[in-house]
């Protein structure tokens, strides 16, 4: 078992991030992802072949131009909010029967 520690979420800064193994029986696939339980970010890295590689990809951080870490987090949060808005708008209305 690997003990690679995950960095906080790059979008909201939460430490509530976790590895999750999933199985898609329809397509006979098994995969892994990292989820932030606060802002609901889901991170999947197709090239990762094990938990350590997935953690390394999640932990990689890039600064935007010469901005500060705080400014980078603000920009990441804006992107996350916009993606959540788009996803919410694309949900179909559910009616109770």
Image (cartoon, rainbow, N blue to C red):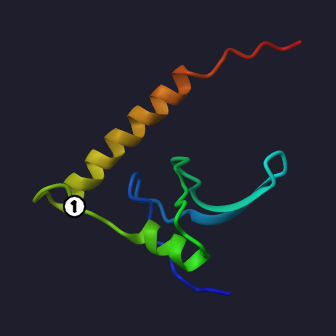
Q: Percent x, y for residue 86?
A: 47, 27
Please tell me which residue is depicted at 53% across the width and 82% down the height of the picture: 4
Residue 21 vs residue 35, the one in the foreground: 21
Q: Is residue 72 above or below residue 18?
A: above
Please tell me which residue is depicted at 56% across the width and 21% down the height of the picture: 90
For the C terminus, give its image quadrant.
top right
Residue 44, quarter of the rendered image: bottom right
Q: Percent x, y for residue 42?
A: 55, 51
Residue furthest left in the image = 66
Q: Percent x, y for residue 95?
A: 78, 12
Q: Is residue 93 above or below residue 42?
A: above
Which residue is disc 1 drawn over? Answer: 63
Q: Is residue 85 rendered to the left or right of residue 76? A: right
Please tell me which residue is depicted at 16% across the width and 60% down the height of the picture: 68
Please tell me which residue is depicted at 23% across the width and 57% down the height of the picture: 70
Q: Is residue 36 above or below residue 57?
A: above
Q: Percent x, y for residue 2?
A: 62, 86
Residue 60, quarter of the rendered image: bottom left
Q: Is residue 87 above or below residue 93?
A: below
Q: Residues within 10 Å of mark 1 (few under 14, many from 20)?
A: few
């Amino acid at each position: 078992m690997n003990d690679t520690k995950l960095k906080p979420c790059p979008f909201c800064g939460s430490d509530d991030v976790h590895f999750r193994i999933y199985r898609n029986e329809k397509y006979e696939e098994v995969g892994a992802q990292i989820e932030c339980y606060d802002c609901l970010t889901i991170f999947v890295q197709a090239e990762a072949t094990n938990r350590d590689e997935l953690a390394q990809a999640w932990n990689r951080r890039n600064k935007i131009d010469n901005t500060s870490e705080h400014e980078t987090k603000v920009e990441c949060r804006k992107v996350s909010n916009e993606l959540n808005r788009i996803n919410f708008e694309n949900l179909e209305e559910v009616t109770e029967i």
